[in-house]
Image: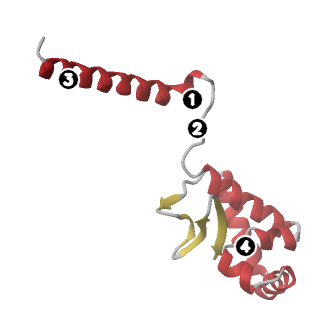
Amino acid sequence: MTRLAGTRRFRVTRLLAAALLLSLACAAPAAAGVRTPPPGAAPRQRLARFLSAVEAARWEEAQALLSARWRGRLTPAGLAADHAAAGPVAARAVERARALLGAGAALDLRDRTALLPVGPGKAAVLLEEGNDWFVDALE
């Protein structure tokens, strides 16, 4: 065997080994019984938690679930005041979003944004910040 043939065989062997390891790594979660959450599960759960906090008037919890720009502008008391000032409009927005989540409506995932359309030109908007999702709008 020539040196060139031996080098090629070594490279092919390494490539096959790498491919085998990669295929095993991809199969590992299924083999171990680990289920990957469906796309949109994390923002959906975060929105449901926010809606529950708002419905129960747990303003500190709700404020902590807001996006960074809103956490920086609104205190829990400010969020409560805004919600109260919006009156029935705010309650209807929460009801619409809750009903859609309950019906299994799909979230539109784009880059680091998740949208739940709740009406013509209206949506619940969540932003991915770090490794978590935060509510940026509920129209």
**Above or below: residue 127 compared with residue 35:** below
Q: Amino acid at mark 1?
A: Pro
Q: Secondary structure at mark 1?
A: helix
Looking at the image, which is closer to me, 83 or 73? 73
Q: Amino acid at mark 3?
A: Thr
Question: What's the CA distance linking mark 2 and mark 3?
Answer: 40 Å
Residue 30, visible in the rendered structure:
yes
* Tag 2 and tag 1, C-beta contact below 8 Å: yes
Point 76% across, 64% down: residue: 51
Instruction: Write down the residue under mark 4.
Output: 92
Q: Closer to us: mark 3 or mark 1?
A: 3
Tell me which label, 3 or 1, sits earlier in the chain: 3
Q: Closer to us: mark 3 or mark 4?
A: 3
Instruction: Write down the residue under mark 2.
Output: 36
Q: Secondary structure at mark 2?
A: loop
* Tag 4 and tag 1, C-beta contact below 8 Å: no
* Res. 43 image quadrant: bottom right
